[in-house]
Image: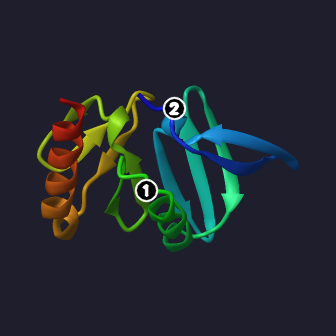
Amino acid sequence: MDDGGMTILLKDNGNDLYVKTDDIYYIESQHNKLVFSMDGRKIINKGTIKDMLQNLSNNEQHQFCHIHRSYIVNLAHIKERDENDLLMPDGQRIPVSRHRLKYFKEQYGKYLEGLS
């Protein structure tokens, strides 16, 4: 077993905050800002989806999947899935874009296989 994944450094109201990637439900891009959604809180930092994906892939974080141009989800936190969107623990429904649907299904399948 691992110890809860890697940690990333975020800024929260000017303070450094170390967050376990396992605790992140999803990351939403909004105009060169990233909104990190976790249990009961959202933290906004400057950055782009592209940079965050690079950071996560450098650290072997295969539990994250880029499902829409504005969203990266943590596959470990998907509560329900219907044809075109995902229900997250905070009640947010996140769309899976049509051209990323096949990729998402492959990544989610691999993730679930890794759990067994």
Q: Is residue 11 left or right of residue 106?
A: right
**Label 1's element?**
loop
**Tag 2–tag 1 contact (CB < 8 Å):** no
**Which label was assigned to residue 97?**
none
Amino acid under disc 2:
Gly
* Callout 2: SS: loop
The quarter holding residue 88 reads top left
Residue extending farthest right: 14
Image point (29%, 29%), residue name: 79
Vertical side of 91 occupied by 36: above or below: below
- In this figure, what is the number of numbered marks? 2
At label 1, the amino acid type is Glu
**Residue 112 image offset from top left, x and y in percent:** 19, 38
* Badge 2 or badge 1: first in the primary sequence: 2
Residue 101 shown left or right of residue 56 in the figure: left
Viewer-proximal residue among 113 and 47: 113
Q: Residues within 10 Å of mark 2 (few under 14, many from 20)?
A: few
| Residue 67 drawn above or below residue 1 | below
Residue shown at 43% from the left, 63% from the top: 70
Locate the N terminus and report the quarter of the image it occupies: top left
Residue 33 percent coordinates (x, y): 64, 64
Q: Which residue is mark 2?
A: 4
Q: Can residue 67 be seen by looking at this rendering?
A: yes
In the rendered image, which residue does mark 1 sit on?
60
List x then y, in percent, for residue 72. Answer: 41, 55
Q: Quadrant of the C terminus?
A: top left
